[in-house]
Amino acid sequence: MRAEPTAIFKTLSDPTRRALFERLSREGELTVHALTVPSGVSQPAVSKHLNSLKLAGLVRDRRDGRETYYHAEPKALAPLIDWIGFYSTFWHNRFDRLGALLKRMDQ
Amino acid sequence: MRAEPTAIFKTLSDPTRRALFERLSREGELTVHALTVPSGVSQPAVSKHLNSLKLAGLVRDRRDGRETYYHAEPKALAPLIDWIGFYSTFWHNRFDRLGALLKRMDQ
DNA sequence: ACAACAGATAACCATCCGGTTATGGTTTTG
DNA sequence: CAAAACCATAACCGGATGGTTATCTGTTGT
C-alpha cells in the first residue's frame, strides 16, 4: 500500500497556502504574525491555512508564550516524489524510482 | 521566470483525475470509452477530467474517426520537480545533480 | 489590575468543483 | 438510410473551499 498523495496535492494547490510553506522552507521558524503581514490575507485565514498544512504533515508548530512558531517539514513531500517516479513511466525510466532512491539517501 | 505549479497541483489533487493520468502513463494511448469503463464515473465526467488534464498540459488528444485517443505528457510534471527542489532546501540538496539531468532531458 | 497583543475558533458568505442527466454532432455499422 | 456508438457540451445541483468579521482564550507589559 502506497502513501496517499491526494492530501498533499490538495494542500499545495492553493497559492496562498503554498506561499506560506515556501516562506517557512526558506526562512525556518516564523510566527503566525510574521507570516501574516506580507501574506495579503487576514490573520484567521493564515491560521486556517497553517492548520491545513499541519494536517497534511507539511508543517509543525511550537508554542512559546503567546506566540506560535511554525516550521516546514520537507520530508512530508516524499510521497509526492514517490508518486512522480512510480506512476509516470517517463520519470520512472530515467530516475529508477526516484522516491525510493532519495529515501535511501536519507540515512 | 519559473513555471507556475498551481495548475498542476490542482489538477492532480483530484483522485479520479489522477487515476486517469496514471492509467494513461502506464498504458499509453486510450480512448475515452476505454478510460470510462473502470473509472467509476460517467462518460461526461471523464471527458471533463480529460479536458482539465489537457488544459494543464498533462495529456494530449488525437481524434481518429469517432474516437478520441488520449495519452499522457509526463514532461508536464517537470515544474513539480523543479518546485520541490527549488523551495525545499531539504530536497534541493538531494537534487543537486538532478537539475542538470532535467535540463539535459529537455532536448 | 488592566490594556494590548498573539493566535485560534465560530459564524457566515460567495464561489468553485465534481458529479449527474440530457442532448447535440460526427462517424461507423447494419 | 437508419440506428447505434463515441464524445463533447450544456444545464443543473450539493458540498467543499477560501475568504471575511467577530469573538474568545491566553500571555505580555505598564
Image: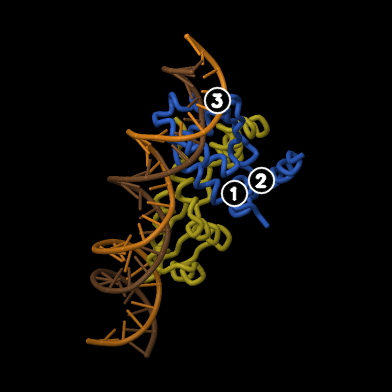
Chain colours: A yellow, B blue, C orange, D brown
Identify the residue under disc 3: B66
What residue sits 37% from the left and 66% below the top? A44
Kindly report the distance in space between the C-alpha atoms of the residues bearing marks 1 and 2.
9 Å
Compared to A47, does B53 lie above or below? above
In space, the residues marked 3 and 1 are separated at their CA atoms by 40 Å
For the question of whether residue B2 can be seen, the reply is: yes
For image coordinates 53% across by 28% down, the residue present is B23
Q: Chain of mark 1?
A: B
- Where in the figure is residue B99, as x and y percent of width and height? 70, 46
Figure check: A15 above or below B11: below
Instruction: Look at mark 2 in the image and give the residue it sits on.
Output: B95
* Residue indicated by mark 1: B84
* Sequence-earlier tag: 2 or 3: 3
Evaluate if marks 1 and 2 touch, with contact meaning CB atoms under 8 Å apart.
Answer: yes
Residue neighbourhood size for the residue with mark 1, other residues' Cα within 10 Å, grouped as few (<14), some (14–19), many (≥20): many
Along the viewing direction, whichever of D17 and B67 lies nearer the viewer: B67
Asked if labels 3 and 1 share a chain, the reply is yes
The chain to which mark 2 is attached is: B
